[in-house]
Image (cartoon, grey):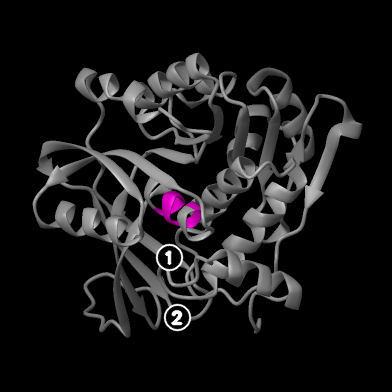
C-alpha cells in the first residue's frame, strides 16, 4: 500500500503557441482539466502502476474541490479529504507548444490544523510506503512522527524548499531533492551535495534529480556509494507534473521491494512517458511502462 500525503490540486491546462505578452489576448490551442500536486498526481502515478494507493490531503469547498475529488476517485485512489471553508486550491498552467515550457499561476491549499493531524493514525493503517511533500510543515512533521511509530517507510520530496524543509529531512528514509535545492543547501555539485546531505539528512537513500541529465543518488556517505541514473529521452509536450509522477512511481517501486537503482529507473521512465503527452494522459500503467522499456523508447524525440 502506498500513501501520499500533502498537496493535491486541480490544474487548468492551456496550450498556447507561445507565452503571452502583457496586455495581450491569446487563444488557447488546447485545454484540459487534470489533477495535480505531488500528493494528487503522485497517487495517480502509483495507482496506474497497479498498487493500492490512498491520499490524505486538505481541500477547500466549491466547484474546484468537487472536480478535484471526482478526478481522483475516477482513478481508483482511496481519498481521505479534510475540507476547509475556503476556495479550493487550483492552478492555471500555460504551456507553450514548442518546447513544453510552462507558466503556473496558483492558489494555495488549506493548511493542516490539529483536527487534520488527529486523523493521521487511522489513515496510516496498513501502509507500506508513505510519500510526503514539504508544502505543509505541520502535516509533514506529524506524518513523519506517525510513520516512525508504525515503521512505515517514508519518501520525502523536498521540492524547491520551504523554511521548514531542512528540519524534516533527517527524519525520512528516502529523500529526493532537485539539484537547485541541493546546491543551495550545500554550495556543492549534485554529487558532492548528495554525499553531504546523506550524512545528515536521510536514513537510506538521498537522490538529486537533474532533469534531462538524470540524477545521482547515494546509499552512504562514501564516494563509492554514489550512483547515477540516466534520464529517458522523450518528446516534451507537457513538463508540468513530471516530478510528481517521478516521485509517485518511485514510491510504488519501493513498495514492490525494488532496490534503489531500479526505483530510480522506474521513476525516470514514468516521468518520461508522462511528459510525452498533454496532462495526465502519459502517466503510464504497468503494461505501458514495461512495453516502453522493452522497446527502449518513450516516444519519438524531435
Pointer 2 or 1: first along the chain: 2
Q: Which residues are magenta?
A: 41-46
Q: Main secondary structure of the magenta part?
A: helix
**Residue in the foreground of this view, choosing between 152 and 133:** 152
Q: Which residue is mark 2?
A: 97
Of helix, strand and loop, which one carries label 1? strand
Q: Residue 153 location in percent, x, y?
A: 57, 29
Q: Residue 152 location in percent, x, y?
A: 53, 26
Quarter of the figure with the C terminus: bottom right
- Which numbered circle lies on residue 138? none
209 lies above or below 72: above
For the question of whether residue 296 can be seen, the reply is no
Determine which quarter of the picture holds residue 67. bottom left
Of helix, strand and loop, which one carries label 2? loop
Asked if residue 125 is among those painted magenta in the image, a careful observer would answer no
Q: CA distance from mark 2 to mark 1?
A: 10 Å
User: Of all residues shown, which one is farthest toward the right?
Assistant: 224
Which residue is depicted at the point 66% across and 56% down? 266
Q: Which residue is mark 1?
A: 102
Amino acid at each position: 500500500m502506498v500513501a501520499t500525503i500533502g498537496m493535491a490540486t486541480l490544474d487548468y491546462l492551456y496550450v498556447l503557441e507561445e507565452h503571452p505578452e502583457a496586455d495581450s489576448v491569446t487563444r488557447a490551442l488546447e485545454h484540459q482539466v487534470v489533477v495535480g500536486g505531488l500528493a494528487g498526481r503522485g497517487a495517480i502515478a502509483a495507482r496506474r502502476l497497479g498498487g493500492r494507493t490512498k491520499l490524505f490531503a486538505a481541500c477547500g469547498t466549491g466547484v474546484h474541490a468537487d472536480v478535484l475529488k471526482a478526478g481522483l476517485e475516477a482513478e481508483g485512489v482511496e481519498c481521505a479529504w479534510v475540507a476547509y471553508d475556503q476556495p479550493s486550491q487550483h492552478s492555471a498552467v500555460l504551456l507553450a507548444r514548442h518546447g513544453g515550457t510552462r507558466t503556473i499561476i496558483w492558489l494555495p491549499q488549506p493548511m493542516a490544523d490539529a483536527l487534520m493531524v488527529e486523523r493521521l493514525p487511522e489513515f496510516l493503517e496498513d501502509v507500506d510506503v508513505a510519500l510526503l511533500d514539504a508544502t505543509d510543515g505541520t502535516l509533514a512533521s506529524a506524518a513523519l512522527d506517525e510513520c516512525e511509530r508504525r515503521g512505515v517507510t517514508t519518501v520525502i520530496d523536498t521540492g524547491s524548499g520551504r523554511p521548514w524543509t531542512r528540519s524534516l529531512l533527517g527524519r525520512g528514509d528516502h529523500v529526493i531533492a532537485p539539484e537547485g535545492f541541493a546546491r543551495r543547501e550545500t554550495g556543492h555539485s549534485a554529487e558532492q551535495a548528495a554525499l553531504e546531505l546523506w550524512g545528515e539528512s536521510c536514513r537510506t537513500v538521498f537522490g538529486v534529480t537533474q532533469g534531462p541529465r538524470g540524477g545521482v543518488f547515494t546509499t552512504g556517505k562514501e564516494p563509492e556509494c554514489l550512483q547515477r541514473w540516466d534520464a529517458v529521452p522523450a518528446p516534451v509536450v507537457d513538463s508540468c507534473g513530471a516530478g510528481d509522477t517521478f516521485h509517485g512511481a518511485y514510491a510504488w517501486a519501493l513498495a514492490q521491494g525494488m532496490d534503489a537503482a531500479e526505483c530510480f529507473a522506474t521513476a525516470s521512465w514514468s516521468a518520461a512517458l508522462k511528459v510525452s503527452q498533454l496532462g495526465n494522459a502519459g502517466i503510464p500503467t504497468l503494461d505501458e511502462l514495461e512495453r516502453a522499456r522493452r522497446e527502449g523508447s518513450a516516444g519519438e524525440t524531435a
